[in-house]
Image (spheres, rainbow, N blue to C red):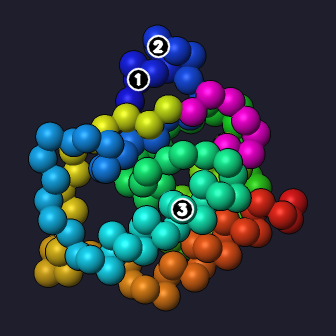
Amino acid sequence: MLPPVLSFDADIVMGGRLVAPQFTRVSYFWHKLGNRFITFVFNIFYNMTFTDIYCCYLLYRRPLLDQDGLVAEGWEQHAEILCRVVKKGGVAYEVPINYHGRSYAEGKKIKAYHVLAVLWMIVRRRFLP
C-alpha cells in the first residue's frame, strides 16, 4: 500500500481484490455482484475508476478526513470514509491485494440489505453536506 504514497505522492490508496491478484478465492456470486454494483455506483457519483471499493484496504492522508464528522456506524461507514476522502480530492491509486474472504461458517456477516445502506451513504455524501 505504501509504494504509491512514497513514489507518486498518492493521497488515497485502495487495495483491489480484482486488480490482477496472483490467487483469488472463489466467492459467493451475489456478494461479488453486489460489490461490483456498489463500486459501479460509487465510480459514477465520484468520477473514479476503482474496481473494488469494499476490499477492506484503504489508506489515506489524515488531513482528508475529519473523524468527528462521521455519522455511520455499520457497513456503510467504509463508504462514508471513502466518499469524504475522495470528495476532498487528491491523487488516488489502486494496488492488487491478496484476500482470503470468509465463509458464513467462518463468520461472514454482510447481507443483501446492507447494500441499500451503503448506496444511500454514497448518494447522501455526494449531494448532502
Q: Position of residue 37 (x, y in %)?
A: 49, 70
Q: Nearer the viewer, residue 21 or 114?
A: 21
Q: Assign a secondary structure to mark 1.
A: helix
Q: Which residue is tagged 3?
A: 40
Dividing the image into 4 quarters, which one contains the N terminus? top left
Outermost residue toward the bottom in this view: 113
Q: CA distance from mark 3 to mark 1?
A: 25 Å
Q: Is residue 77 visible?
A: no
| Mark 2 closeness class: few <14, some 14–19, many ≥20 residues within 10 Å | few
| Mark 3 closeness class: few <14, some 14–19, many ≥20 residues within 10 Å | some
Q: Assign a secondary structure to mark 2.
A: helix
Which residue is depicted at the point 65% across and 58% down?
44
Q: Is residue 114 visible?
A: yes
Left or right: residue 102 versus residue 19 is left
| Magenta highlight on residue 88 | yes
Which residue is depicted at the point 21% across and 42% down?
21
| Mark 1 closeness class: few <14, some 14–19, many ≥20 residues within 10 Å | few
Amino acid under disc 3: Phe
First reached walking from the N terminus: tag 3 or tag 2: 2
Which region of the structure is painted magenta?
86-92
Outermost residue toward the top in this view: 7
Which residue is depicted at the point 70% across and 58% down?
45
Mark 2 and mark 1 in contact (Cβ < 8 Å)?
Answer: yes
Left or right: residue 27 versus residue 53 is left
Q: Which residue is tagged 2?
A: 6
Q: CA distance from mark 1 to mark 2?
A: 6 Å
Q: Which residue is tagged 1?
A: 2
Q: Nearer the viewer, residue 41 or 86?
A: 41
Amino acid under disc 1: Leu
